[in-house]
Structure formats: structure tokens, C-alpha cells
Image: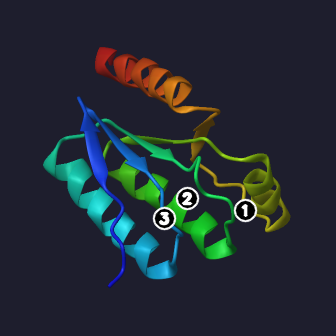
Amino acid sequence: MTERVPVLRLGDILLVSIQVDLEDETVMNLQEDLAEQVVARSARGVVIDITAVEIVDSFVGRMLATIASISRLLDAETVVVGMRPAVAITLVELGLSLGGVRTALDLEKGLALLRRSVSRTDLR
């Protein structure tokens, strides 16, 4: 059975901390689970913590961009935090710019970025 990545709620922000190897089925399940949670919890932001991720392939890179696109369509912004230098280098070498995905060095900075962004959109 494929592992599920837990989705935690921090107010109007969802936190996904990836602590398992990202197999294709795990990533597909995460995409579905996260979309459902964004709607069910009226989330305004999503933080995906990939600190424990050591290796990515093109499929995982595209899925991160897809998750961000889905969240944006559901009125939630996505920030990926904790990217290791080797992961960043691999994504660039694979030609994956992760368009639409904002990044921050760590969870604290990612949450601050989202909170600033969410408060700006609330003012509109």
C-alpha cells in the first residue's frame, strides 16, 4: 500500500511535510488529497516542506508545479520550503522552472511569506 502524506491545518494555511520517498502514486495521492483539503477547509495557502527530500525527478518536479496550479485555481497560494541545493540544481538541469511556485528557505519564512500574501488579498 502506498504511503499517504499527511496534510496539517494551521489556521487558513495547510502544511504538507514530505517525509517519505516520493513515488509516483504517492505524489498523485497527495495532489488529490491536497485539492480536497483546500476546498474542505477553505485554505488560503499551502506550504509544502521538502526538507527531507533528497532526490527529485522530472515527474515530481512537474507535480509540484501542478499542485501549485491546482491550489491557485482553488484560491490558495503555494510555497515550497526547505529545498536542498542538490534538488534545486536537479530541477534546473531538468529544465523545470516550477512556474507559479513560490519558494522560501525554511518553514518560518514560508509561513511569513504566505501570511503577508494572504493579508494583502484580504484587503482587496
Q: Are marks 2 and 3 in contact (CB under 8 Å)?
A: no
Q: Is residue 11 above or below residue 103?
A: above
Residue carrying label 3: 20
Q: Which of pointers 2 and 3 lies earlier in the amino acid sequence?
A: 3
Residue carrying label 1: 96
Amino acid type, label 1: Leu
How many other residues sit within 10 Å of disc 3, few (<14), some (14-19) or many (≥20)?
few
Q: Is residue 100 above or below residue 24?
A: above
Q: Residue at x 71, y 47 (%)?
A: 84
The span from disc 2 to disc 3 (Cα, nearest Å) is 19 Å
Q: Quadrant of residue 118?
A: top left
How many other residues sit within 10 Å of disc 2, few (<14), some (14-19) or many (≥20)?
many
How many other residues sit within 10 Å of disc 1, few (<14), some (14-19) or many (≥20)?
some
Lateral position of residue 32 relative to residue 59, left or right: left
Q: Nearer the viewer, mark 2 or mark 3?
A: 3
Q: Which of pointers 3 and 1 lies earlier in the amino acid sequence?
A: 3
Q: Residue at x 59, y 46 (%)?
A: 51
Amino acid type, label 3: Val
Q: Which of pointers 2 and 1 lies earlier in the amino acid sequence?
A: 2
Residue carrying label 2: 65
Label 3 residue SS:
loop
The span from disc 2 to disc 1 (Cα, nearest Å) is 9 Å
Label 2 residue SS:
helix
